[in-house]
Amino acid sequence: MDETYIPVTEPVPMSPKERFSRMGVALLLIAAVSLVGQILAMALMMILVPDRIRSIFTSENGLWLLSFLPMYCLAVPVGLLMMRSVPAMPGARNPLGRRGFWKYLLMCFPVLVGGNLLGSWLAMLLSTGQAEDPLLEFATSTNPLKILFMVILAPILEELVFRKSILDRAAAYGEKTAVLFSALCFGMFHMNLYQFFYAFGIGVIFGYVYLRTRDLRYSIGMHMIINFLGGVVAPCINNGM
């Protein structure tokens, strides 16, 4: 990847510090609005919903909705709106082809396994064996809503944020810098050591593919396949065994 600095033509010049700061604030806004939205949704449910039907919202389906709807319906749109204040530098599209798609997808799996092992080992080491994966319950669930949130919405919205929005705005300062920044944000956004390393690793691959093609469909497709295999197929096989 070319590391040459390419200046961006914009009405009001924006320094690299201001550009990256605004992108960081947008990501922080997504996390904050998501957390506050979840808390408010739970509080309103406890206050406004009668006791006799509250079990609907405290069921597994209700908890999935209360957990993910604030993020995907409120937090992500707010963050993307904030991101628009940073000028983008889109590039020309280049096809990847089927062979290229499957090649980069297969590259993700050793990264997933190695990153998962490293994250689990480090989490256990730092916690002296007391750490627990905070998303284990979601990961092992076979709830049908998982397909909507983890296989469809999460890949689309996360690729829109961490690949297109960030890379189109950071690529002006070198493609390697942009890919590493995007992957680092993607890993940190998962907010736990268990997922950080493999999220960072596949973030590098997704970022490279996006900058090479400038077509978000490829990284979305790979993201969907990985989430489907890890979040739907693996729990079904595990429960069957």
Image (cartoon, rainbow, N blue to C red):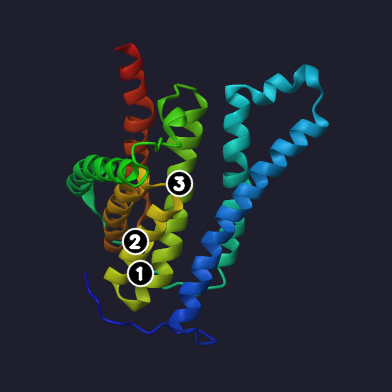
Mark 1–mark 2 distance (CA, rounded to whole Å): 6 Å
- Position of the C terminus by quadrant: top left
Say if residue 92 shows up in the picture.
no
Position of residue 89 in the picture relative to residue 11 (left or right): left
User: Residue 12: where, in percent of width, then height?
Assistant: 54, 87
Q: Which residue is mark 2?
A: 214
SS at circle 2: loop
The residue under the point 59% across, 37% down is: 67
Say if residue 78 shows up in the picture.
yes
| Residue mark closest to the camera, 3 vs 2 | 3
Q: Which residue is mark 3?
A: 156
Up-down: is 76 above or below 53?
below
Position of residue 151 in the picture relative to residue 48 (left or right): left
User: Residue 158: where, in percent of width, then height?
Assistant: 45, 50
Mark 1–mark 3 distance (CA, rounded to whole Å): 20 Å
Q: Quick check: marks 1 and 2 in contact, CB under 8 Å?
A: yes
Q: Quick check: marks 3 and 2 in contact, CB under 8 Å?
A: no
| Residue mark closest to the camera, 1 vs 3 | 3
User: Residue 73: where, in percent of width, then height?
Assistant: 62, 46
* Kind of residue at badge 3: Ile
SS at circle 3: helix
List the single residue furthest toward the top: 240
SS at circle 1: loop
Instruction: Tell me which corner region of the image, top left, top right, bottom left or bottom right, holds residue 182.
Output: bottom left
Q: Which residue is mark 1?
A: 91
> Front-most of 133 and 226?
133
